[in-house]
Image (cartoon, rainbow, N blue to C red):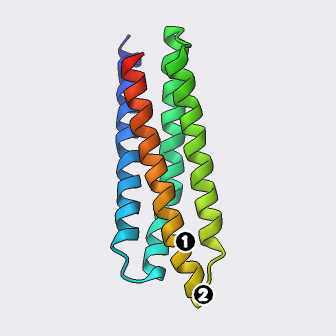
């Protein structure tokens, strides 16, 4: 049973770190010094973000399989993780085509990225509240 306790602990810590990266990225956008610096910081954390999201999914599935739990909250968590992954991929695809000279696209990306991170953070909070209720 000790393995399952460490699995849920790893799951929770990965969620906290994932939420921390989301908050860091939105603060990076809000406190932008230059677009290039902001883009580098966000690009640096993108692989870490996806790794943590994969850890969240993996440890959650291990815990679910061990305890034979398959309810609405678990399905919601899996769907939310995939939704967050898709949003992050779309955000990254939009970022990578912006050139340093295209100021209009840079400004539109800032608004887009703020919305994406706000949706991701809200998704995590809503899923947490629903999981606590069920």
Question: Residue 61: x, y in percent?
Answer: 55, 24
User: Element under label 1?
Assistant: helix
Seen from the viewer's position, the closer of residues 11 and 23 is 23
- The location of residue 95, given as percent across then percent down, is 59, 70
Q: Is residue 2 above or below residue 78?
A: above
The residue to which callout 2 is attached is: 102
Locate the C terminus by quadrant: top left
**Up-down: is 52 above or below 42?**
above
Give the quadrant of the N terminus: top left
Describe residue 44's horizontal placement relative to residue 82 as left or right.
Answer: left
| 3D distance between C-alphas at marks 2 and 1 | 11 Å
Q: Which residue is denoted by mark 1 in the rendering?
A: 109
Q: In the image, residue 21 lies at what x, y percent?
A: 39, 54
Farthest residue, direction bottom? 101
The residue shown at (41%, 53%) is 22
Q: Quadrant of residue 27?
A: bottom left
User: For this rendering, which residue is in front, 124 or 9?
Assistant: 124
Q: Nearer the viewer, residue 97 or 63?
A: 97
Mark 1 closeness class: few <14, some 14–19, many ≥20 residues within 10 Å:
some
Question: Residue 112: horizontal and vertical position, in percent?
Answer: 53, 65
Looking at the image, which residue is at 50% across and 63% down? 113
Q: Is residue 18 visible?
A: yes
Residue at the spot 42% in from the left edge and 44% down from the top edge? 122
Q: Which mark is residue 75?
A: none
Which comes before the other along the chain, label 2 or label 1? Answer: 2
Q: Residue at x 35, y 50 (%)?
A: 20
Q: Residues within 10 Å of mark 2 (few under 14, many from 20)?
A: few
């Amino acid at each position: 049973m000790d393995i399952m306790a460490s699995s849920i602990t790893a799951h929770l810590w990965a969620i906290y770190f994932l939420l921390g990266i989301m908050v860091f990225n939105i603060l990076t956008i809000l406190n932008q010094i230059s677009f290039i610096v902001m883009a580098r910081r966000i690009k640096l954390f993108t692989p870490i973000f996806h790794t943590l999201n994969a850890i969240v999914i993996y440890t959650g599935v291990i815990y679910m399989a061990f305890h034979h739990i398959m309810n609405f909250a678990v399905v919601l968590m899996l769907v939310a993780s995939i939704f967050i992954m898709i949003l992050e991929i779309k955000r990254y695809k939009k970022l990578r085509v912006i050139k340093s000279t295209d100021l209009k696209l840079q400004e539109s990306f800032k608004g887009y990225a703020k919305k994406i991170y706000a949706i991701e953070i809200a998704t995590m909070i809503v899923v947490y509240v629903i999981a606590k209720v069920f």
